[in-house]
Amino acid sequence: MLTRYYKGYSHNLGRDMEFKVYGHAGLPFIVFPCQDGKYFDFESRGMIDTVADKIENGQIQLFCIGCVDEETWSAKGGDHHGRIMWHEQYMKYVCDELVPRLHQIHAETDPTSYYGKVMLTGASMGGYHCVNFYLRRPDIFGGCLSLSGLFHAGYFFENYNDLDVYFNSPVDFLPNMDYNHPLVDQYRHGKIIICCGQGAWEDEAKADAWALQAQFERLGVPAWVDVWGEDVNHDWPWWYIQFPYHVNKLLGY
């Protein structure tokens, strides 16, 4: 398996950011880490192994990135407006700096097999990020595969709300979107998978998944909200099963 490490300065964040690429060809995914996680977590936790055959066969390529959660979503005692604005800077880093670099890296080893938009994936907080980023920027992302995500910003911004928090809270902004909103038409052409269980630590994820499903149905968006059984917990052993299962679905298996 071709594996490469990159480190580069982000002008939007004013610091070096690291990421790692797995694979040489195929459908590219940006992988967000779990809350406060690192770019190497997907590998160290064994998630890369669950789709190693797809990576080695040139069907998918994973771009595992870092985050700034410790300064944004996890920093509950900090300045709320400053926290959400720093998240906005992170979004600019991903969309304006990382994505163009991703396309350059992909073209170095696979100039022909992939034409289209980048997919997004992640578990837990990474599951939130991939859905939120897709709903914000369907012009550059082709869809999202979320595992056990929470989609209400109020979990992290208690007793505080402003427009920037609102537009990063899918369970809040989707209900106010009109059926004919131009973003909604783009959603209808994307691939949206939201998966969670009904076991331990999944109550909020399940409630948010059902809330988003209701809005997608209202808007005519063909999203797949896949809620697994009561024995399925918010934890890595289940993500090891859910991730390759849904990657196969995205690849048409």
Image: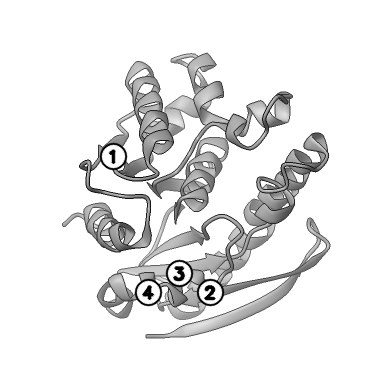
- Label tally: 4
- Find residue 85 and report its horizontal and vertical position in percent: 77, 41
User: Label 2, label 4: how many angstroms apart (C-alpha)?
Assistant: 10 Å
Of pointers 1 and 2, the one earlier in the residue sequence = 2
* In contact (CB < 8 Å): disc 3 and disc 2: yes
* In contact (CB < 8 Å): disc 3 and disc 1: no
- Find residue 16 and report its horizontal and vertical position in percent: 76, 71
Residue where numbered disc 3 is placed: 42
Kind of residue indicated by mark 4 = Gly
Residue where numbered disc 1 is placed: 198
Q: Residue at x 55, y 22 (%)?
A: 172
Q: Nearer the viewer, residue 120 or 45?
A: 45
* In contact (CB < 8 Å): disc 3 and disc 4: no
Residue where numbered disc 2 is placed: 40
Instruction: Give the left or right position of residue 171, taking residue 113 as reference.
Output: right
Point out the image quarter for the C terminus.
bottom left
User: Label 3, label 4: how many angstroms apart (C-alpha)?
Assistant: 6 Å
- Find residue 68 and report its horizontal and vertical position in percent: 69, 56
Kind of residue indicated by mark 3 = Phe
Residue where numbered disc 4 is placed: 46
* In contact (CB < 8 Å): disc 2 and disc 4: no
Kind of residue indicated by mark 2 = Phe
